[in-house]
Image: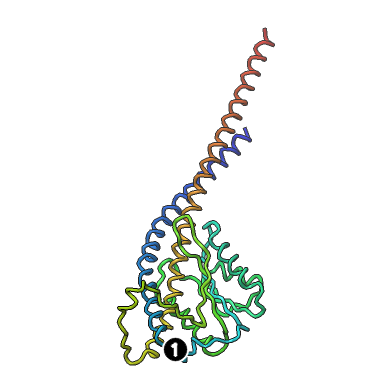
Amino acid sequence: MANIRDLRRRIKGIKSTQQITKAMKAVSAARMRKAQENVTAARPYAKRLVGVLGRVASVVSGVKHPLLDVREPKKVAYVVITADRGLCGGFNSNVIRKAAAEIKDIPDVSMVCVGRKGRDFFRKRGYNITQQYVGFGDDINAGQAREIAQYIIEKYSEGEFDAVYLVYSEFINVLVQRPTVVKLLPTEPPKEEKKDEAKTVGRADYIFEPSAEEVLATLIPKYITNTVFQGMLESKAGEQSARMTAMDNATKNASEMIAKLTLTMNRARQAAITKEISEIVGGAAALE
């Protein structure tokens, strides 16, 4: 009977865990829908900003700006965006693995960690963490991205960083999140998209006020801030999707474990009952 009691205790514990994973799946599904809407809403602005920056850069040549200053990359910084919490499958480990592969051959690298999981990983391994941002929560806003962007812009302008890269998980769909590396500094303005020849011939010239150089100087910090913001939104959507999938798998695995343990318990009960019946029959036969 002790074996049966142990099985019942295990089944009860697994059912309790299953209720937790089911609740976490529902919460993550709701947060994932909101995060996905935020990503979808932000992408058109990011695309348009890249297009405007490319058009301005195409008519400006030889402009001087601190964020366009290309230096020998002796001191490189990586902004790594991860989650503050776990229980989201391989989401965090994939981003960290991508960042670790990028920095393994760089002798002087500085880490700017956005998220507790990435910070803990690189801190334990002795990397130089110059700045950390944790506890942003689920409601990502532009002010948080602006704070990060201002920090890296300041350090790059002061010469403490020679190059800055952003590592985050791009949200593809609910099941796929792709670790991505983007170069932030020195800023490389995207080239203007090529149109077909007929449209190119009829393209109008742009008039910049006060000047194309000043417009470009205003756009570059906005471009960096928006790139960081977009990376944070993509990572948050990927995190919630990965957590929802992980909790769904955990709930299904719990159901399978409960079914197997229930079958084992029923077999143990049947064996115990059969043994008791055999003992009764054997005792009655001995009395005859």
Q: What element carries label 1?
A: loop
Q: Which of 214 and 229 is in front in this view?
A: 214
Q: Is residue 196 left or right of residue 276?
A: left
Q: In this view, does 284 lie above or below 1?
A: above
In the image, is 51 to the left or to the right of 260? Answer: left
Identify the residue position indicated by label 1 in the image. 61
Q: Which residue is drawn at 38% across and 72% down?
A: 47
Instruction: Give the position of the N terminus as an image quadrant.
Output: top right
Q: Is residue 140 above or below residue 221?
A: above
Left or right: 67 in relation to 7: left
Q: In which quarter of the image is residue 53?
A: bottom left
Q: Residue 83 placed where, x, y %?
A: 51, 65
User: Where residue 209 sits: x, y (%)?
Assistant: 31, 90
The residue located at (32%, 84%) in the rendering is 205
The quarter holding residue 102 reads bottom right
Front residue of 89/269: it is 89
